[in-house]
Amino acid sequence: MTEKYREFLKLNFYQIYPKSFSDYNNDGCGDFKGITQKVAYLAELGVNAVWISPCFKSPGIDSGYDISDYTDVGEEFGTLADFKEMLDCFHSYGIKVIIDLVVNHCSTEHEWFKEGSKSKDNPYHDYFYWFDEKPNDWKSCFGGSVWQWNERTKEYYLHSFTVEQADLNWENPKVREEVKKIVDFWVDLGVDGFRCDSLDLVSKDFVNDKKCYGPRLHEFIREIFGREKTRGLYTVGECWGTNEQILKDLTSEGRGELSSCFVSGNITHANKRFYLPERWDYDILHRHITKNQEFCEENGLIFAPFFENHDLCRCVSKYADDRDLRYESATFFATLLYTLKGTPFILQGQEFGTPNPYYDDIKYFDDAETRKFYELNKDSMEESELIRRINDDTRDGGRHPLAWDGGLNGGFNDGHEPWLPLHSRYEEVNLENDRRSKKSVFEYFRKLIALRKSSDALINGVFKDLTGDRKDCFVYSRTGEDGEIIVVCNYDRESEIVLPFDVKKITGNYPDGDGKTFRPFEATIYLKIKQ
Ligand code: TEU
Ligand code: CA
């Protein structure tokens, strides 16, 4: 690994969902000025990088992932000057900023589509995929067909997500030129990198009937990011179904593709949510993490661990205990996250253990995928069952206005009705309450992030799984120049864990115990004592 890659390993990310972070002008939608006024808070937490979800011009059908102008910001967030002010503020605290690059598709309100759908000889027609007849029966990621009829040209166009998100035709070199221009625009403005949305979909394989990971994927990505101008950026691709070989090709240093990848079955649940009441299987979690840590170590790759993002619900609810053991659950996941090798990502609110909220009617949900799921199932499923499953797995789960305190609108703004309802538990679970509590999740995150920053073992150290055949805990070491750190993460039941060597406790999420009886979700970090 070169020095540049080692620098990336020092990053720890915080995902800001800008619509729901902080609403400065009290119009119901979070904004750049709201973010700017909270930068000091993020610095206090210790994050040194943020990922800002889409804040571009968009009709908002898929919460900003349907972009109608890539080089301008949405008015609801402020002006480009406000964006720049926010960016400069982050930089003044030494915090790097990456933004979403959503170029597998654009909004059907984008000029390209408005023009290209007019006639077959329009210069923008080839910016999209068109067929006289449906060439296959591919399904949209949100359910239903990917093919939509366009009356004006009497053709079908491809949309991997909603009907209002038309897939861009990357086979067309002009499209790739446009993507480069978008990237360069933001790089010139000063952003430090990109989170590349649905990047695994940009090369399709119609011949072999594959919607993603087509034959030109690597070539396309290199064309965008392999340039002199972009080689220093931190880029993380959302490549959900990547296997080991593809991961290696996508993220090996020197290939000019990506720095890192978000991979399903890396440390999230094995299969993407689909409104099933599934719970975390800790043994699968253990195997996935171990496999990926070892693979990345062997190949000099950067892993991007995460448990939450704006498409997943909250980990304490989905996988652990969001009531009596909410503190222990939230800090258990934090311990894992910050002691693995890679660039960890958390979602806003995770730092004070935000659980999933609950709403009893579909009218309280905004997410395009959730609404589609409701539409597709409302005639065949009992309403109460449908609402229960939606609450369990909706992408809205992590998107509600952030609860800064228990007062008016949770401190998100000064009282204007927010775009999405306040979190149903905001009066109980909010940052202010958490920080006042003796068991503060925030305080634990802050401590852990500081520990990580000061430890060569946690940043560069080699990962080794020490769990053996056990299925009730996950034990591993990280060995760096400053020593060997041992991490013990006990799952949901009490277990006896006796380490075969002497250790000294550095920190953990329970007060001192007897050193061998581990309580539910107890996670402890030790330094191994050299014999
Ligand atoms: O999500 C894409 C997504 O759902 C992927 O997991 C997809 O299934 C995969 O790429 C297929 O291989 C992203 C955003 O995170 C989400 O919020 C958007 O709705 C979506 O793209 C469309 O932009
Ligand atoms: Ca606002």
Image (tube, helix red, strand yellow):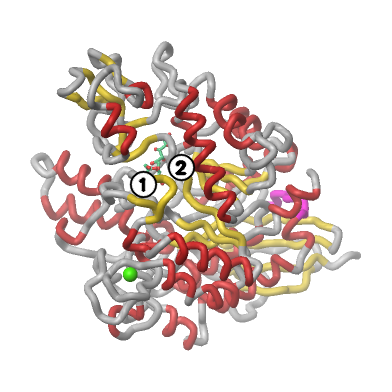
Residue that carries the numbered disc 2 in the rendered image: 197
Q: Where the N terminus falls, by quadrant? A: top right
Label 2 within 8 A of ligand 1 by Cβ:
yes
State which quadrant residue 297 falls in: top right
Residue at mark 1 to residue at mark 2: CA–CA distance: 9 Å
Direction from residue 384 to residue 204 in the image, left or right: right
Alpha-carbon neighbours of circle 1 within 10 Å: few (<14), some, or many (≥20)?
many
Vertical placement of residue 531 versus 118, above or below: below
Rendered location of residue 136, percent (x, y): 29, 16
Q: Nearer the viewer, residue 456 or 506?
A: 456
Please give the name of the residue rendered at 61% of the width and 53% of the height, measured from the top-left corner. 192
Amino acid type at circle 2 is: Asp
Rendered location of residue 396, percent (x, y): 31, 57
Vertical placement of residue 390 versus 66, above or below: below
Q: Which disc is residue 65 wearing? A: 1
Direction from residue 393 to residue 231 in the image, left or right: right
